[in-house]
Image (cartoon, rainbow, N blue to C red):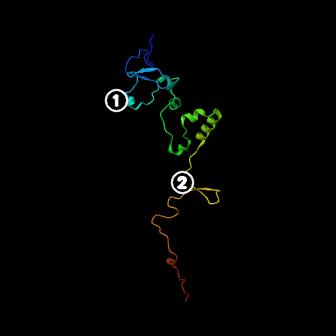
Amino acid sequence: MALYPCVQCDEECVDCTIQCSCCDRWVHSACVPMDDALLLAWSDVSLKFLCKDCCFTDNKYDMAKALERGQYRVADSHKHFEITATSWVNKTVPERERLTKRFKNYIPPDKRVITSTDGRMNVIKPRALGKKIGQRKRKINERTTTFKKKKD
């Protein structure tokens, strides 16, 4: 039995191998469906690699399992939820669950909606603030008057 068997072919991994970031097992670079240029770029950037056992369950690709261990960033609308790893570790389990629930239920405010002055109603903001294209504000003295026709 090999000391470091390949996850794909079960042969000994000696050189040209990649280590899974999840289970720390080794895979031959030839067994991974990547070309040489991509493998070189992968090693320079030091991204995480997940083997087939860590990404697949029952021969189906498990997206959630792969994403839980991936390299990802927080969206700009959710930046206020960022927390350092040490402060996350120091939190209790109920605090972590509360923060996770708040993160999942958070809906960013819509910039196209304005609230009425009394705060009771949300209205979609008009594109041009109630003016038609090319419309200009009329001065009071520019009003025209129509005269009634005189009856003969």
Q: Nearer the viewer, residue 73 or 143?
A: 73
Q: Residue at x 60, y 37 (%)?
A: 100
Q: Residue at x 54, y 54 (%)?
A: 112
Q: Quadrant of the N terminus?
A: top left
Q: Secondary structure at mark 2?
A: loop
Q: Nearer the viewer, residue 106 or 147?
A: 106
Which label sits in the foreground, 2 or 1?
1
Q: Nearer the viewer, residue 106 or 131?
A: 106
In the rendered image, which residue does mark 1 sit on?
37
Cα–Cα span, label 2 and label 1: 45 Å
Residue 6, placed above or below residue 87 = above
In the rendered image, which residue does mark 2 sit on?
112
Residue 94, placed above or below residue 114 = above
Marked residue nearer the N-terminal end (2 or 1): 1
Q: Residue at x 58, y 40 (%)?
A: 103
Q: Nearer the viewer, residue 6 or 126?
A: 6
| Residue 46 percent across, percent down from the top left | 42, 30
Left or right, residue 36 beside residue 92: left
| Residue 58 percent across, percent down from the top left | 53, 23
Counting other residues with Cα less than 10 Å from the Cα at mark 1, is it few (<14), some (14-19), or many (20 or more)?
few
Q: Quadrant of the C terminus?
A: bottom right
